[in-house]
Image (cartoon, grey):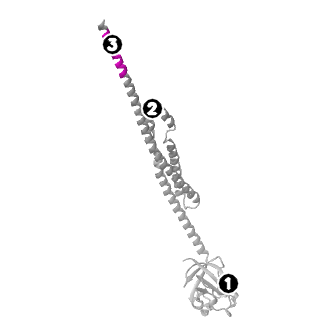
Amino acid sequence: MRTQSRVTTAAVSISVILAVVGGLSAAQSAVAQTNDVVRAKSELSSALSDAAVIKAAASQHIAEASTKLAAADRVLASSHGRTLEETTRAALADRIRRAEQVLAAARIELANLTPADLGTVYKKGSPEGLQEAASDVQHAKLTAIRGIAGSVTDVVDAQSKVTAAVTSWNAHRKAAAAAKVRASAHVEHVWAAGFQTQVNACRGSVVLTKQYGVPTIGERWDCGGSQFAKQGQYVRLTGLMSGLYRVGRVAAVLDASVNTSLDVPRGYQLLYQTCRNDNSHTMTFTVLTKVAA
């Protein structure tokens, strides 16, 4: 009987020990589980912190890119009909379209950078779920966000070419207009410098600068003065003087019997003098402004 009792006691003791050991293992497992959750949460928090930095920078890049695309759009619109060819404008339109697609994709990437169900992930708190969420953030697709700078550079390059094309078109248009003006301008030959003797020779305009003290050319009314270009028209001088001039207003009408050279108007590039209706009492001085060589 005593032997049976000792066996029973030993069995009970082993059961207790196993129970205690089992309790310790469960506790240790719980602690390990808690530690895994803490580490996983820390890893996710770190990933989210990095994502916040990326979001801030990407948002700024997207905003700046949007501003540059809007400017390029304005250049494209304003250049319509103002280039010698359409190739550069077509290239800019294509670059803008591509950049807009990149920005659209970048906005989607930005929205997906933080998991939509983040609150649920934290609430459940499983190490696996937290680690998966951290991995999703760490390995988020950022292809379009990284492509913003390159696509905007392409747009800016294409925009500069359109701007240059518009500048070329303007120069071409001005040259064509100048050629048209030259072709239609009144030709005035300045054949000599002197005064009344040369003017009376009726061979064209005479440089009268020395006599009047201001840059002046002149001729008789009946030798060409009556046919001289009117205000708003153009005159092309040849001979002793050259250049294309725009005819302005009559700056003064003087009387040769009353006025002197001191009364001739000052401050003009050049004056054209003639006696209206061949009358020395109505000496007109018309303003000439040089517009081209």
On residue 83, the disc is none
Is residue 237 in view? yes
**Dot 2 lies on which element?**
loop
Q: How far apart are marks 2 and 1 (CA)?
A: 104 Å
**Dot 3 lies on which element?**
helix
Q: Distance between the residues labelled 3 and 1?
A: 146 Å
Which of the 4 image quarters holds residue 224? bottom right
Residue at 50%, 37% in the rendered image: 118
**Dot 1 lies on which element?**
helix
Residues shaded magenta: 5-21
Is residue 45 or residue 15 the one in the foreground? 15
Task: Give percent across and percent down for residue 240.
Answer: 54, 85
Residue 129 shown left or right of residue 220 in the figure = left
Is residue 141 in view? no
As shown in the figure, which amino acid type bears the numbered disc 1? Ser
Residue at 33%, 16% in the rendered image: 13
Residue holding disc 2: 126
Q: Tell me the quarter of the image containing the C terminus.
A: bottom right
Which of the 4 image quarters holds residue 135? top left
Residue holding disc 1: 226
